[in-house]
Amino acid sequence: MIDRVTEVDRRRTDTRDRLLSVALGLFARQGYATTSLREIADALGVTKAAVYFHYRTKEDILTGIVSGHADALNALLDDAIPRTSTLAGREELLRLYAGYHAAWGLDLTRLARQTDTEISSLPIGAEIRRTYRRLLDGLAGPDPTLLDQTRARTALAAIQTVALAPTLEDDEDQLRDAALTIGLEVLRQGQPTTPPN
Amino acid sequence: MIDRVTEVDRRRTDTRDRLLSVALGLFARQGYATTSLREIADALGVTKAAVYFHYRTKEDILTGIVSGHADALNALLDDAIPRTSTLAGREELLRLYAGYHAAWGLDLTRLARQTDTEISSLPIGAEIRRTYRRLLDGLAGPDPTLLDQTRARTALAAIQTVALAPTLEDDEDQLRDAALTIGLEVLRQGQPTTPPN
DNA sequence: GTCTATATATGGATAGAC
DNA sequence: GTCTATCCATATATAGAC
């Protein structure tokens, strides 16, 4: 009995997840506002009405894509932020974020970049901004100067360069290594005690 | 006679430029796709039809905002790129871009960030991407490794952090200084001959 | 140069059959 | 779970008076 229920649940969530995956790709490439439900439905091989069976609104689709990742990142932040008073803790935070970034894939970052414009007025947009704000505050360390804050923003941007490279194909891992190397460089330069290389 | 013509021209372009200025602000804050012509007209204190008297399409407004700046940046690149085979030349290029960035204001950068999504399919979007590509290639120097390319992207991102800071108000100049400092740091780390500090 | 009014298309979302 | 058909709001853009 449990098997049958599990099977039904899986089938249901499979369709739902396929929808989220397709929508994420379109949102990331074209933008949230620019992407219509008709495009999502076409890419999925169904009609708009079928999409509305799974998600009540377009905004719900976006929330379905993002909220789980935001929760995961917030949990990571809950754990790592208390250690960011030291440079080692901040380096660890950047590594952790880079790891999540790699696991999520590139589209999610491209979508998150729309937080300040297209999806700025939506509740989920505000949550994304709050989460990034926590991440930046952690990377900047306690009582940060303007330079420290800029350093944090730049280190974060370094990791995200992977998602902005036009073509990456098979050298994605090398790109991630390069991005993390430079991000850590940026963080370390703020600490005069650490000798460069 | 020339005076009268000049006067008429100025009056005409004043209205046109006010429109561009208002539209830029809205596009930068809300996104190009999300902003309707009704919002632009309201912010300008006129009706939609009046807007259409000055610009034939919404896309024309966007082009009117961006094209002049893209041309200016391209001219700067024509001049500076030949010297980017040396680190000093690449530093100069980053300084020049930072200077333009400061002169343009923040909204233009926020608008340019939409090139990969909302306005990706428009001709002007392609031109912006081409221009940024030239800038990145210049900053990366000749025969760049993946690390060099990532360095270029990160240095550019450092300058742009100014436009992404949530509240800046009167300390914008200090923020720009910090951003340029870190951007140059990132470029220099690629050159082992340059001692840090 | 700006207005009112309107044409026209498309978007998000729902109703109800299968 | 998916379909066809439709509602309704809003968007871009135009026509024509002032």
Image (cartoon, coloured by chain):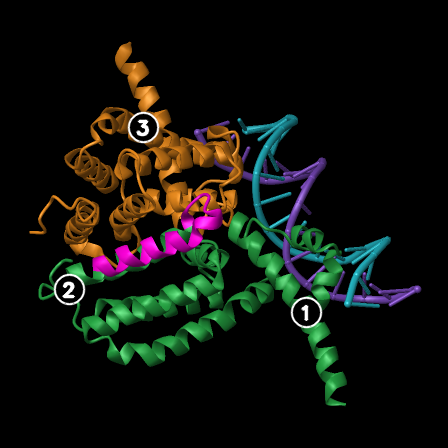
Chain colours: A orange, B green, C cyan, D purple
Say whether residue B180 is left or right of residue B117: left
Dot 1 lies on which element? helix
Q: Is residue A177 part of the magenta span, yes or no?
A: no
**Residue beneath label 2, please?**
B145
Q: Which mark is residue A150?
A: none
Instruction: Tell me if residue B55 can be seen.
Output: no
Query: Callout 2: few (<14), some (14-19), or many (20+) C-alpha neighbours within 10 Å?
Result: few
Q: Main secondary structure of the magenta part?
A: helix
Q: Where is residue A15 in the image (x, y as percent from the top left)?
A: 37, 32
| Chain identity of mark 1 | B
Please determine if labels 2 and 3 lie on a single subunit.
Answer: no
Identify the residue at horizontal 18%, vertical 49% (top origin).
A189
Dot 3 lies on which element? helix
What's the magenta region?
B164-186
Dot 2 lies on which element? loop
Query: Callout 1: few (<14), some (14-19), or many (20+) C-alpha neighbours within 10 Å?
Result: few
| Chain identity of mark 2 | B
Q: Where is residue A110 in the image (x, y as percent from the top left)?
A: 36, 47
**Three-letter amino acid code of the residue under disc 1:** Asp
